[in-house]
């Protein structure tokens, strides 16, 4: 016996009076990835800092750039930082930001950097500083925010907006003639609406610390801002740094205009590179040369390294690895690095050059720390200075300075502690010392073990000079030391 199974009538049959089912053929839409720079979330990822810390990020990155520009021009830096109700300005006495560089930074489809592929003790290494600063004003205040860059006789007023149809950023650059010396970069916003309320969120944080109604959080933010600026003065003896904070001027004058350190334009050392680093640099050069329709010899490539400027030294290196008249592109085969030949080249470069001694990186020194600590109100007899440096291997110098602070005011109120941390002559926004090598402890835990709380009246500065700094995040806010420091002496 056959069982009949009833089935539901087809939904598309005209018998039941139903419309034929529609089928959506989805279209794959393409949206530009450059939009990633124009969202708060992505800028937090790029900078390693939340929105309320972006004024600190702006100052840090712009002062880094200003100091680098002056160092490359062999000019003792003079940096002016001005904070007022409508914005922040960082100006320097360097050679001026080239207009071509500014234009390249406005192209968010590429990364343009002369730092990222090299291994060297430089202030910045990721090459995205100005590219993250450009969209910041518009992300926070789409209507009024702008970045003003003045250099080489032009004033660029840059506004960024989003094309609502294409969902692509549109950059409006209003360039006008202007008198200029060095470079001036200003991040600007509309300070108040008709009712006197702050329009741009940062205006409420960058408040005059003498305002008794400011509130503890805002006063603490003001102190963080000033500590960041003072850190740059502590770690750069050749610089004069002036902070104009709502009309109150603080100047940190240079203590040694002729002070020397490893400059951004000094050759890097083959001893600082591991295989992955040298391959990254070779790949960057090959890509750059291909775009420029040129071929670079291996001999040209190695001539840029410390100790290999002379033709005799280069000849020895090339003979050792059989690479005379070999082009750099020949170290790539079938889209892959020839790791064996590259390893031979790196070994030969190391064999025919001397490792860089730690002192060549640059030593800030006891006298400079003591002079600036004194200007900050330290108790002279409590001042201590230590230096630790490598004796062989990867060069590094760690310097620390400590002192008690004198109490302030007629009522002799105690001061809170001030901690200045820095890496390669750049002041850090937050404490980057989360872990010291194998001991697993960071700066904060070590201070806690010594009963140095936030309310203790102390000054503490910690600075590291190191050619190969490994950060744990893209915003360069945390790092780990893997080398064990070797102390050379209490004061030396």
Image (spheres, grey):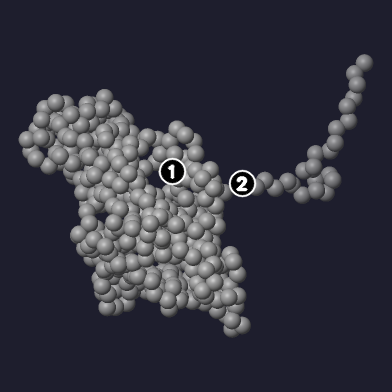
Q: Position of residue 125 (x, y in %)?
A: 35, 48
Total labels: the figure holds: 2
Residue drawn at the location 43% of the way across and 78% of the way down: 247
Furthest-left residue in this view: 312
Q: From this viewpoint, is residue 108 visible?
A: no
Position in image of residue 100 (x %, y %): 28, 62
Front-most of residues 1 and 176: 176
**Residue of label 2:** 25
Give 249 or 470, whichever is nearer the viewer. Answer: 249
Q: Earlier in the sequence, mark 1 or mark 2?
A: 2
Label 1, label 2: how many angstroms apart (C-alpha)? 49 Å
* Element under disc 1: strand
Q: Which residue is mark 1?
A: 479
Q: Position of residue 408 (x, y in %)?
A: 49, 68
Q: Is residue 399 visible?
A: yes
Splitting the image into 4 quarters, where does residue 286 fall?
top left
Relative to residue 170, is residue 119 depicted above or below?
above
Q: Quadrant of residue 131?
A: bottom left
Give the quarter of the figure containing the C terminus: top left
């Amino acid at each position: 016996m056959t069982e009949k199974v009833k089935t539901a009538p087809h939904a598309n049959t005209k018998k039941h009076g139903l419309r034929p089912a529609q089928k959506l053929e989805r279209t794959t839409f393409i949206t530009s990835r450059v939009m990633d720079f124009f969202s708060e979330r992505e800028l937090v990822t790029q900078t390693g800092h939340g929105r309320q810390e972006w004024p600190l990020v702006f100052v840090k990155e712009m002062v880094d750039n200003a100091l680098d520009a002056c160092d490359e021009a062999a000019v003792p830096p003079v940096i002016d930082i001005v904070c007022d109700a409508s914005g922040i300005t960082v100006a320097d006495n360097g050679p001026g930001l080239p207009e071509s560089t500014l234009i390249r930074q406005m192209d968010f489809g590429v990364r343009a950097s002369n730092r990222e592929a090299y291994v060297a003790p430089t202030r910045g290494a990721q090459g995205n500083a100005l590219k993250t600063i450009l969209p910041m004003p518009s992300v926070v205040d789409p209507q009024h925010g702008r970045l003003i860059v003045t250099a080489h006789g032009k004033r660029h007023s840059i506004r960024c907006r989003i094309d609502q149809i294409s969902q692509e950023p549109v950059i409006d650059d209003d360039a006008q003639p202007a008198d200029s010396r060095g470079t001036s970069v200003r991040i600007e916003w509309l300070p108040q609406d008709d009712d006197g309320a702050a329009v741009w969120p940062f205006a409420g944080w960058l408040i005059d610390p003498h305002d008794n109604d400011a509130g503890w959080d805002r006063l603490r933010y003001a102190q963080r801002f000033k500590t960041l600026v003072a850190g740059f003065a502590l770690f750069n003896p050749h610089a004069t740094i002036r902070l104009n904070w709502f009309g109150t001027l603080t100047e940190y004058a240079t203590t040694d205009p002729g002070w020397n350190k490893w400059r951004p334009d000094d050759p890097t050392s083959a001893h600082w590179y591991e295989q992955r680093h040298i391959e990254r640099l070779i790949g960057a050069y090959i890509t750059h040369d291909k775009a420029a329709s040129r071929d670079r010899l291996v001999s040209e490539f190695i001539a840029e390294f410390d100790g290999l400027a002379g033709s005799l030294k280069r000849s020895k290196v090339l003979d050792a690895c059989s690479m005379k008249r070999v082009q750099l592109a020949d170290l790539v085969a079938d889209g892959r690095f020839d790791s064996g030949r590259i390893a031979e080249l790196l070994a030969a470069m190391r064999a025919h050059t001397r490792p860089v001694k730690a002192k060549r990186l640059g030593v800030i020194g006891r006298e400079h720390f003591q002079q600036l600590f004194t200007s900050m109100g330290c108790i002279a007899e409590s001042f201590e200075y230590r230096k630790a440096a490598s004796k062989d291997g990867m060069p590094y110098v760690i310097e620390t300075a400590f002192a008690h602070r004198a109490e302030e005011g007629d009522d002799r109120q105690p001061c809170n502690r001030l901690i200045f941390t820095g890496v390669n002559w750049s002041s850090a926004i937050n404490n980057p010392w989360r872990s010291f090598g194998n001991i697993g402890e960071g700066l904060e835990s070590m201070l806690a073990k010594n009963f140095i709380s936030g309310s203790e009246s102390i000054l503490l500065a910690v600075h590291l000079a190191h050619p190969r700094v490994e950060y744990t995040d893209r915003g360069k806010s945390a790092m780990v030391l893997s080398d064990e420091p070797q102390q050379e002496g209490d004061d030396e």
